Amino acid sequence: MSKILVIAEHDGSALNASVAKTVACASSIDGADIDVVVLAANAESIAAEASKLDGVARVLTVERAENAHALAAIYGPQLAMLADGYDYVLGPSTTFGKDLMPHVAALLGVNQISDIMSVDGAHTFKRPVYAGNAVLTVTAPEDQVVVATVRIASYASVGGSNSAAISSAKVSADLPSHTRFVELQSGASDRPDLQTAAKVIAGGRALGSEENFELIYKLADKLGAGVGASRAAVDAGYVSNETQVGQTGKIIAPDLYIAIGISGAIQHITGIKDAGTIVAINKDEEAPIFEVADIGLVADLFKVLPELTEALD
Amino acid sequence: MDKILVGLKRVVDYNVRVRVKNDGSGVETDGVKMSINPFDEIALEEALRMKERGEASEVIVISVGSTDAQQQLRTGLAMGADRAILVEAESAGGSLGVARIFKAIIDRDGIDLVMLGKQAIDDDNSQTGQMLAAIWGRPQATFASKIELDGNVATVTREVDAGLEIVEIDLPAVISVDLRMNEPRYVKLPDIMKAKKKPLEIIALADLGVDPGPEIKEVAFAPPAERERGIMVEDVAALVAALKDKGLA
């Protein structure tokens, strides 16, 4: 049996979609016996969601006022104590997991594996390196706990027809006061979340302005799609940072990805190459994005975007 | 604040198209341009600006790696760092080893702020800063795009998946930086000449007495699965038809 602890990412009230994908990775480990732990101020609604995930044996909750915000300095020591008796401790490779899991690994005195894309054996994993230009097979020591993040774009969410037992866990970790949450400035919109949306429309520098991004939003709303952007578009201030797709932004795998006015630098491509279908619209027929696109259209985006939005019903 | 320690990793340059060696033992580095990890360069730029504003008195750059990493440390000195430390090691055994080495230097030199990139563009790990904060028992602010210092408190803006998160941390601390923090300066020739006279200390890993910890072994490198080039369409009508064919519109 492989005892696996998955840390639940959440926003204080709802479970993040990354958890169902992390559980999918955990389920691919031989003999998986999976617990999900929810650290929160109020864990009830989050734990209820986690208990529905297929493959989860138990949901543990640790409710403390300090757990209201996911600070590594606060979650780290608790998770390191909770890890006792587990063979694996897994988190998603979102900014939440990337911030927290190395901290936990160091407290446990082990190295951490980032971005697991496949489980090849009990201690053998594949992960992308060099912006996805190479796939590296690694092995972790067999006599130590494996602490890792899971590349969520590599996994499909597990189903939600389970009803795992929920119980509270006690952790007596001393928590520091040297790190304090101030606020979250969220560009939250009603559009689907970029990391889990089935369709994503993304714009690049060629949009030329914040106002012109309206063309992207109109098409996205017509398709019920999430909105993404290239690094260049974010750097130029057309859209906010959480829309950035690529090596240093979000790695996504929607069924449909439409890249508009994005040239397709390797750092961007690495963020989308697991998409089902890639569509590229670009004025420059030499743009590298066309090398990976399933459907390409060489055209002026300002002419074809309104046409496309009109044509799709 | 007195001293800022900035980690500089030597990596294959951002613009190089990386190729996996035929025998799967790694990626081609022969004759390939090597540079400072771009995120680390941004960290150094921010540290230098702090010193120029009078918020710090000394900026120290550190690298862990082969003797060749002296090139990147010299570039850091030319940018304006005061001194450099190379911990010479063929392998530090992973991020935990590097974090423990940084901790040994912190204990020796007394450091108020450690700055480094949020990830290295070779292994794409994003681990060292977080590990250092954990073993040091000090705050970490990762993926930072803005830092405001007020005495011994830093207010840091972090680029997270949900937007921008603001945290307040007490120094000493570790900050890992994201791309949009600043635009690093260009090094001028006179600065390169001056940098040659700045101190660059070389320490053998064995002399630090650091246990690198259990290693994660790199078994084999392989090229990624390639996507095939698809079809080109002439106009919007053909695009919509192709999407409908795939059941996507």
Image: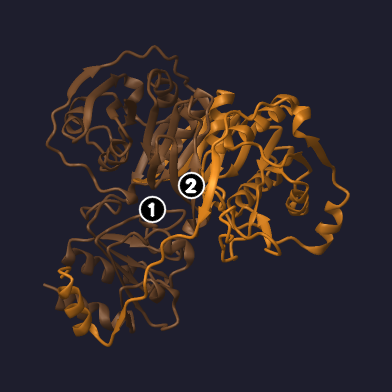
Would residue B176 be found to the left or right of residue A11 on screen?
right
Quarter of the image for residue B62 reads top right
**In front of the other: A300 or A16:** A16
Could you tell which of marks 1 and 2 lies nearer the N-terminus? 2
The answer to whether residue B127 of the structure is visible from this angle is: yes
Determine which of the numbered discs, if any, sits on residue A57 in the image: none
Three-letter amino acid code at the position of disc 1: Lys
* Mark 2, other Cα within 10 Å: few <14 / some 14–19 / many ≥20: many
Q: Is residue A261 left or right of residue B245?
A: right
What is the three-letter code of the residue carrying label 2?
Answer: Thr
Q: Closer to the camera: disc 1 or disc 2?
A: 2
Tag 1 subunit: A
In the picture shown, does residue B20 fall above or below B55?
A: below
Q: Nearer the viewer, residue A208 or B14?
A: B14
Among the chains pictured, the one given brown colouring is: A
Q: Which mark is residue A250?
A: 1
Q: Nearer the viewer, residue A41 or B65?
A: B65
Q: Residues within 10 Å of mark 1 (few under 14, many from 20)?
A: many
- Identity of the residue drawn at 28% across and 37% down: A27
Q: Position of residue A295 (x, y in %)?
A: 29, 76
Left/right placement of residue B69 relative to residue A155 reads right
Q: Which residue is mark 2?
A: A137
